[in-house]
Amino acid sequence: MASHTLTTKKMQDYRRRLRAAGLRPIQIWVPDTRSADFAKEARRQSLLVSRHESEKETLDFIEIVADMSPPQ
């Protein structure tokens, strides 16, 4: 139980230092990018955008500047 108390104290001190630095905690819920549903929906939306004439200039620009080299 002492380990839990020490961990709690460390976290409280850490949060206190962050607040003293002018930061505040927030919680943000975002889509789970590991989900198959996310990938399916992202693909669906990408295809819709890619077919829309008003997006052609933006998509052409992205294609020109995209770094397609494999990660190192």
Image (cartoon, grey):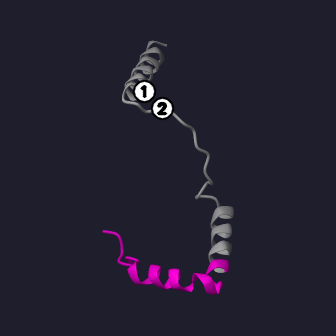
Q: Which residue appears at 36% of the width and 75% of the height?
A: 70
Q: What residue type is labelled 1?
A: Arg
Q: Residue furthest left?
A: 72
The vertical placement of 32 against 67, above or below, is above
- Most frequent secondary structure within the magenta stretch: helix
Please state the total of marks drawn on the protein image. Answer: 2
Residue at 48% x, 32% y is: 24
Displayed quadrant of residue 27: top right
The residues tagged by marks 1 and 2 sit, at their Cα atoms, a distance apart of 6 Å
Q: Does the magenta stretch include residue 57?
A: yes
Q: Residue 24 carries which label?
A: 2
Mark 1 and 2 residues: CB-CB less than 8 Å, in contact?
A: yes
**Which residue corresponds to the image point at 65% horizontal and 62% vertical from the top-left?**
38
Amino acid at dot 2: Arg
As helix, strand or loop, the secondary structure at mark 1 comes to: helix
Q: Give the range drawn in magenta.
A: 48-72
- On the image, the x and y values in percent for residue 68 come to 39, 78
Instruction: Residue 16: give x, y in percent of width and height.
Output: 41, 22
Residue highlighted by disc 1: 19
Task: Report helix, strand or loop for mark 2.
Answer: loop
Q: Is residue 53 left or right of residue 7?
A: right
Q: In which quarter of the image is the C terminus?
A: bottom left
Q: Where is residue 69 in the image (x, y as percent from the top left)?
A: 35, 77
